[in-house]
Image: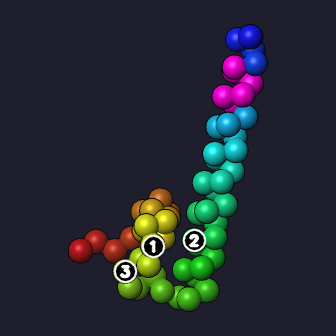
Amino acid sequence: MAYLTILLAAFGLAVAGLVWFLAMSASIRRADRHMSLSGAPRTSIDGATRRLVGVHVRR
């Protein structure tokens, strides 16, 4: 039973990591397509992506 719990937890973390990676990739592509890095981020995901990548603007 413990192995099943560990396997399900590992699978859940892998899926969560994949979803996070895809959201960040989509955000980077959208910001790059609009060339909108000089302005404020449109969504919170865009803001988190900028902080993660290191291109955020300090106020």
User: Which quarter of the rendering shows the N terminus?
Assistant: top right
- Check disc 3 and report the residue beneath it: 40
Q: Is residue 2 above or below residue 18?
A: above
Q: What element carries label 3?
A: loop
Give the residue type at disc 3.
Ala
Q: Is residue 26 left or right of residue 1?
A: left
Q: How many labels does the image show?
A: 3
- Check disc 1 and report the residue beneath it: 43
Residue 7 lies in the magenta stretch: yes
Q: Is residue 16 left or right of residue 57?
A: right
Q: In this rendering, which labeled residue sits more in front, label 2 or label 1?
A: 1
Give the residue type at disc 2.
Ser
Q: In this view, does 15 lie above or below 26?
A: above
Of label 2 and label 3, which has the lower sequence position? 2
Main SS of residues in magenta: helix
Q: Is mark 2 on a helix, strand or loop?
A: helix
Can residue 28 be seen at all in this image of the molecule? yes
- Coloring applied to the structure: rainbow
User: Which quarter of the rendering shows the C terminus?
Assistant: bottom left
Q: What element carries label 1?
A: loop
Q: Give the range drawn in magenta.
A: 5-10
The residue at 42%/77% (across/down) is 41
Q: Distance between the residues labelled 2 and 3?
A: 14 Å
